[in-house]
Image (cartoon, rainbow, N blue to C red):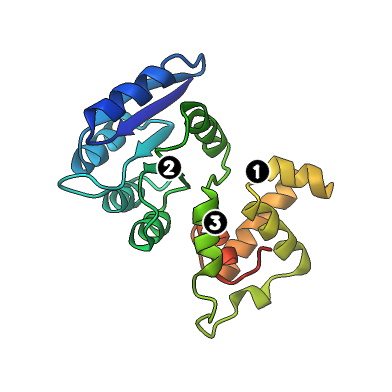
Amino acid sequence: MIRILLADDHEMVRIGVSAYLQTQPDMEVVGEAVNGKEAVEKALALRPDIILMDMVMPEMNGAEATAEIIKQWPEAKIVIVTSFLDDDKVYPALEAGAISYILKTSNAKRIAEAIRETLKGQTVLEPEVTSKMMQKMRSGNGRQLHDELTERELEILLLLAKGKTNQEIADDLFIALKTVKTHVSNLLSKLEVQDRTQAVIYAFKNNLVE
């Protein structure tokens, strides 16, 4: 059973999303938060499998709440569910540690799918978010950390950007799962990032993904 914490300051959104998720045989909403501060408190207390996080909330916004949760609980899996695609919303949330970013205009089935995919370690991004990431920082910052990647590590980075899990990468490349994990660990170190999501962000920012 996937245990979910729902953080959103709009009661009708919480009611609607919660009602749908409760109909899913593999999902259970274990808590709700009405602001960012409460989201942090409940996330750390309940330790849910997935946190659905709104961006604009009182007391503490979604990006701030995400950063605080990740600081205290690095393994947390956070899915941003918002109405906003502004740069000042998208990048802070992802850089704070959110794994996925989807819109409230998505249908309920899409949100449920994003929850399952994120739990597997995949990054789920709206096409508009992906496009923004590809356009950002085209001029670069002068550093080319990816030049240090081996051909295999670069190949795996591109597969990560496609949302592939470690097992799927192992199957695609016909290598052992343990070998994939080693390559992922090495490329994270070389790119100076902390996790897979940040590695994917790096790939898009540096135009490594077509």
**Contact (Cβ within 8 Å) of mark 3 with mark 2:** no
**8 over 59 or under it: above or below:** above
What SS does tag 1 mark?
loop
Residue topped by disc 3: 130
The numbered mark, 1 or 2, whose residue comes first in the sequence reads 2
What SS does tag 2 mark?
strand
* Tag 3: amino acid: Thr
Residue beneath the point at 34% across and 30% down: 5
Q: Does residue 76 show up?
A: no
Q: Residues within 10 Å of mark 1 (few under 14, many from 20)?
A: some
Residue topped by disc 2: 103
Residue beneath the point at 49% across and 59% down: 194
Location of residue 152 (image quadrant): bottom right
What separation in Å lies between label 1 and label 3 (alpha carbons)? 18 Å
The numbered mark, 1 or 3, whose residue comes first in the sequence reads 3
Q: Residue furthest front?
A: 105
**Contact (Cβ within 8 Å) of mark 1 with mark 3:** no
Quadrant where the image shows the C terminus: bottom right
* Tag 1: amino acid: Thr
Of residue 53 and residue 190, the one placed in the foreground of this image is 53
Left or right of 162? Residue 18 is left
* Tag 2: amino acid: Leu
Q: Residues within 10 Å of mark 2 (few under 14, many from 20)?
A: some
What separation in Å lies between label 1 and label 2 (alpha carbons)? 23 Å
Q: Does residue 153 show up?
A: yes
Of tags 1 and 2, the one toward the viewer is 2
How many marks overall?
3
Residue beneath the point at 38% across and 36% down: 51
Residue topped by disc 1: 165
